[in-house]
Image: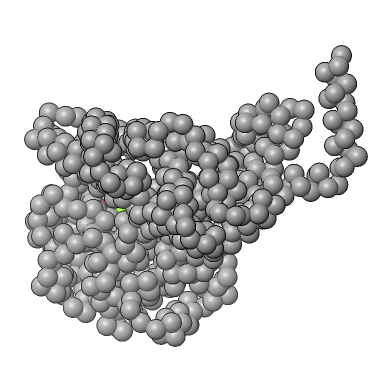
Amino acid sequence: MSHISSVLASLVHVLSHAPSVFWRLTLSGIELGGVYALIAIGYTLVYGVLQFINFAHGDVYMVGAYIGFFSVTVWFASSSPWIQGICGIVLSIIGCALLGLFIERLAYRPLRNGLSSADAVPWSIISAFYVDAFLGKYLAARSVLPAVAIYLIVFAISFAVMLVVLKKLFRMLAPRIKPTNDRLTALITAIGMSLLLENQGAASFGVSPHIAQVKGINQSVAPLIVLVASVVLAAALVFVIKATSIGRAIRAVSQDKDAAALMGIPTDKVVGFTFLLGAGLAGAGGFLNHMVDGVQFDTNIGITLGLKAFIAAVLGGIGRVDGAIVGALLMGLAETYTGASIFSDFKNAVAFVILIAVLLLRPSGILGKTAQEKV
Amino acid sequence: MLKVSNVNVYYGAIHALVNVSLEVSEGEIVTLIGANGAGKSSTIRSISGLVKPASGEISFNGNPIHRSSAHEIVRLGISQSPEGRRVFPAMTVHENLKLGAYSRKCSKSEVSNDIEEMYHTFPRLKEREKQPAGTLSGGEQQMLAIARALMSRPRLLMLDEPSLGLAPFLVQTIFRIIKDINLKGVTILLVEQNANQALKLANRGYVLETGEVILHDSSSELLANDAVRKAYLGD
Ligand SMILES: Nc1ncnc2c1ncn2[C@@H]1O[C@H](COP(=O)(O)OP(=O)(O)OP(=O)(O)O)[C@@H](O)[C@H]1O
Ligand SMILES: [Mg+2]
């Protein structure tokens, strides 16, 4: 009985403050949506050019958060807030963009060009787990390098080495191995990549959560900074896609890859560039959400937040940038409103509820029309 | 100008091109005829670099191109208007034409001049400049595909079934335009189901059957050839 009355009391409280509470919630819903959008754009861009879901994308976001964390707490710990913020976000963007490009070049591109050695890719990822666990421990014990550097170096070395070794092996065995389904191989590769990035994150940074913030940031201003920055970045991305020559090339590749090649567009480079763009935005999202807004994080955020951003992209119509933004805002708002209501326990489930509802009504997402109209 | 020697192409277990050899000289119109599935498109696609021959050589102006990728081959001056038009459906007519000039290193004004020239040749496209290409009629899309292929200022233009699905009147128009393009100095390799008209337009022709070149000769000889008349001209 007392429970019900307390719920009622809080409801009365919310209603009497309705306008201000409502606006505050809306604002933080849009802010969260902005962060989701920065991640969701990467899923949608890559899906546009490759019709492939890059499951490792959420983990790139996680790496962005850690690059931000080390920028703020180690590399620029004694700098002014402005330097911390600007250098931190720039490093997160650059670091993630390069990581995204690296993943595309080493894990996904071999799958597209020549299937016989493509089978080596998923295997090399699995084997890289072991090399990586060993090398990571060894380096961490003896090296003065920062954890992020060890993380990136170990990741690159173990994966690249395994890829080279196994590719050779597969070439030798090739006549005996039946080529597998290329779409399935791509899917397994992406999931393997995601696990590799995440496990290695746990090995390098530990599994306990981290929390930090740009020095001296004003708690009431932080959400506004996140909101403005994500709007600016998303707008810049839309401008690149709609109004520049490389953007037109990206749209061409996502509408018809062969025809794009016939225009003289280097399709592999364009695909690499979309990974660069998407991963860079995810890096920015990681910095903004965790280092500006100070949201606690661990190495699992790649899966948890990444999954929600992916749902947002599907919700809006995967393959479309505007769809990803609309889907992300919808998700951010829904999650925030739910979190403030008596259903707050279902905050994390609401994403799935909306997804199911929308896909029942519009299987291709809110803005998704035909298979042709993408990006 | 273009020399294809003993090219073999496989799609998995399918042997689509069997020792295909052909030549196109500067200024010519050469046509490639054959039944469905004979390997006409595969020939053109391997010249463009969209499929890689398992063996054989392709050279353009004396330089081997069979190992180059498609986007490099366009830069050398070989352009293709592919089977089924393949315009970018969600982009406007204007954007499609701009993309046609992607491979060129030239000023924006040069590109706009060329686009204006295309609008002059194809007035229909001018009227639909801002319309998404996916909403054009089949004939309009075909014009766009040809105009787009010309935007790269090719030395060799390859057309894969430009008359497919067009009304007879429009077919005449397209063939006249191909002739005009050729008169302006562009060499043409034309793939056609419409063998009769193609041979009337072309200087020479190659006949493909299940991946092999079974016959090649001047157009007049091919038009007079009994076997060709039976198989491809419906006599
Ligand atoms: N991507 C592909 N995968 C598998 N087989 C293919 C592929 N493309 C073409 N083929 C096969 O190769 C052969 C030649 O096809 P191609 O498209 O070159 O014929 P075509 O002469 O252009 O026919 P059409 O007149 O119908 O266009 C056909 O048997 C076809 O089924
Ligand atoms: Mg064909």
The percent coordinates of residue A308 (x first, y second) are 56, 37
Image point 58% across, 42% down: which residue? A295
User: Residue at 44% across / 85% down in the picture?
Assistant: B109
Instruction: Report the residue that reaches farthest toward the front.
Output: A78
Quadrant placement of the C terminus of chain B: bottom left
Q: Residue at x 77, y 28 (%)?
A: A342
Q: Estimate the x, y position of residue A319 in percent, counting from the top left.
A: 50, 48
Residue at coordinates 36% horizontally, 82% vertically from top-left?
A: B106
> Can you tell which quarter of the image residue B47 is in?
bottom left
Q: Is residue B22 visible?
A: no
The vertical placement of A232 against A319, above or below, is below
Asked if residue A27 is positioned above or below residue B153 in the image, the reply reads: above
Looking at this view, name the residue that lies furthest to the top: A1
Residue A187 falls left or right of residue B125 = left
* Residue A363 visible in rendering: yes
Image check: A309 left or right of A125? right
Of A235 and B184, the residue lying toward us: A235
Q: Measuring from the top left, give residue B41's x and y in whole percent.
A: 27, 55
